[in-house]
Amino acid sequence: MEIKSVEFVKSSAHPRECPPMDRPEYAFIGRSNVGKSSLINMVVGRTKMAKISSTPGKTQLMNHFEINGDDVAVKAGETSWYLTDLPGFGYAKISKSERVKWERTSKQFLEGRKNLLCTMMLVDSRLKPQKVDLEFMAYMGEMGLPFVLVYTKVDKLNKTERAEFQSKYETIMLKQWQKMPPVFITSAVKGDGREELLSFIESTNVLF
Ligand SMILES: Nc1nc2c(ncn2[C@@H]2O[C@H](COP(=O)(O)OP(=O)(O)OP(=O)(O)O)[C@@H](O)[C@H]2O)c(=O)[nH]1
Ligand SMILES: [Mg+2]
């Protein structure tokens, strides 16, 4: 699928402020600093759509981006869709009340957003499987929320390290799951995984 247009729609503090649920949506979720905003920029082919920072906790609101907006999409005979950048979790320096608020808002968003076809669960390929990530996937599984697993920053690993990471992650996942969810191996720096993510989205859009 070609990205013909990208437009920032709005930032929302609460699910009820989010744009209408009138088209397919994909949300990027994961720990602070995992690379959600960077990956969104890489996928849409813009360097500065979603704000990036080396300080964790940069994205505090839910940011909706409209891809191939109606005019363009209608012409091409495709649907327009949303990419959503969600605030990161698991940042050690935030207060307990902030953490509780994040969890409540995110869960309300995920459970109430009927047009959300899939959540992209990002995990950092430089770290060993993190408890909060595994717990969050368990929650999505219990709620029946579809998700895929996205390994980020693979440009930091060599070929052997990548293979090791994948096999370790799979071993841990398979203790909790009967089978692996779809996996995407990505680098926002090198562009790895872009085509794969876009073709996944294209084939999922038809389910809407
Ligand atoms: N080497 C490398 N660095 C990356 C990659 N993706 C992101 N980064 C870096 O990781 C840091 C965090 O990236 P962000 O995209 O802001 O992460 P985020 O998940 O949106 O973070 P929050 O908004 O704080 O939750 C930045 O310094 C990025 O430049 C990648 O694929 N490779
Ligand atoms: Mg961000």
Image (cartoon, rainbow, N blue to C red):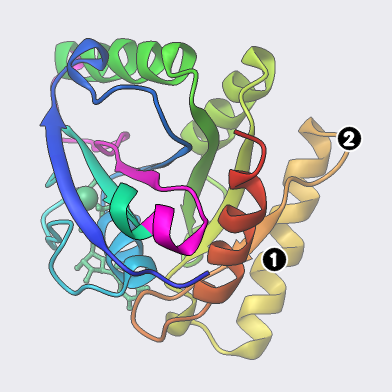
Task: Depth check: give the residue in front, 24 or 178.
Answer: 24
Residue 126 magenta: no
Residue furthest right in the image: 178
Query: Can you tell which mark lies on residue 178?
Result: 2
Task: Depth check: give the residue in front, 93 or 115.
Answer: 115
Instruction: Mark 1 and ligand 1: say if the CB distance to the nearest ligand atom is below 8 Å.
Output: no
Vertical placement of 1 versus 120: above or below? below
Crowding near pointer 1: few (<14 within 10 Å), some, many (20+)?
some
Q: Quadrant of the C terminus?
A: top right
Mark 1 and mark 2 in contact? Answer it, CB < 8 Å.
no
Residue 43 image position (x, y, % from top left) = 39, 68
Which range of residues does the magenta coloring cover?
Answer: 73-96
Total marks placed: 2
The reply to whether residue 60 is visible in this rendering is: no
Query: In percent of the image, x 48 and y 48: which residue is there?
Result: 79
Locate residue 137 relative to residue 5 in the image: left or right.
right
The reply to whether residue 64 is visible in this rendering is: yes
Q: Amino acid at mark 2?
A: Gln
In the rendered structure, which disc, 1 or 2, sits on the residue that comes first in sequence?
1
In this figure, which residue is indicated by the disc labeled 1?
A: 166
Instruction: Quadrant for residue 196, please give it.
Output: bottom right
Q: Secondary structure at mark 2?
A: loop
